[in-house]
Image (cartoon, rainbow, N blue to C red):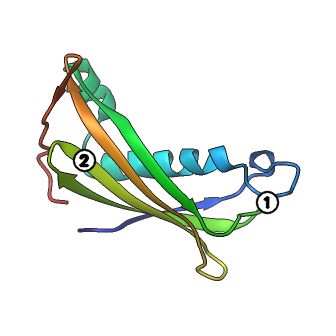
Amino acid sequence: MNTYKLDFRVRDYECDLQGIVNNANYQHYLEHARHEYIRTLGISFSDLHDQGIDFVVARIEMAFKTPLRSKDDFYVTVEMKKEGIRWVFYQNIYRSSDEARVVKARVDSVCLIHGKLGNYEFNVEV
């Protein structure tokens, strides 16, 4: 399994009153990293959609380990694996300054082909 890595920096507006990143923003970081990873594989979600093929999130598990704060540099890792009809993304968020794990996540996605659950195979090595 190849590991993809994408760098980020926390923006002020992503933080809540406690000065830490609001929990919902971690899902945005994970999603953006997944989409960028898929793009590097030469896969276009919009092209697939035009063909009637849509990948949707079926389940997300997230374990919050330590918070990020404004202006923290961090990175998200992505590994993708086929499990039955699901494409599973194993993702982590790490704070760059000390390599502390911030979030550990598993994202299960499924494919809808013309609106019906289907089994789609990417033509790529993962």
Quadrant that contains the N terminus: bottom left
What percent of the width, then of the height, locates residue 35?
40, 45
- At x 27% / y 68%, what residue is drawn? 2
What percent of the width, then of the height, locates residue 55?
30, 33
**How many numbered marks appear?**
2
- At x 51% / y 55%, what residue is drawn? 62
Q: Considering only vertical position in the picture, is 114 above or below 124? A: above
Give, as a three-letter code, the residue at label 1: Ser
Which of the two labelled residues, at mark 2 and mark 1, occupies the earlier sequence position?
1
- At x 31% / y 41%, what residue is drawn? 109
Residues packed near mark 2 inside 10 Å, few (<14), some (14 to 19) or many (20 plus): many
Q: Which mark is residue 87?
A: 2
Q: Which mark is residue 23?
A: none
What separation in Å lies between label 2 and label 1 (alpha carbons)? 32 Å
- At x 50% / y 51%, what residue is drawn? 30
What percent of the width, then of the height, locates residue 60?
44, 47
Q: Considering only vertical position in the picture, is 79 above or below 113? A: below
Q: Which residue is mark 1?
A: 70
Give, as a three-letter code, the residue at label 2: Trp
Query: Is residue 40 at all visible to an observer of this figure?
Result: no
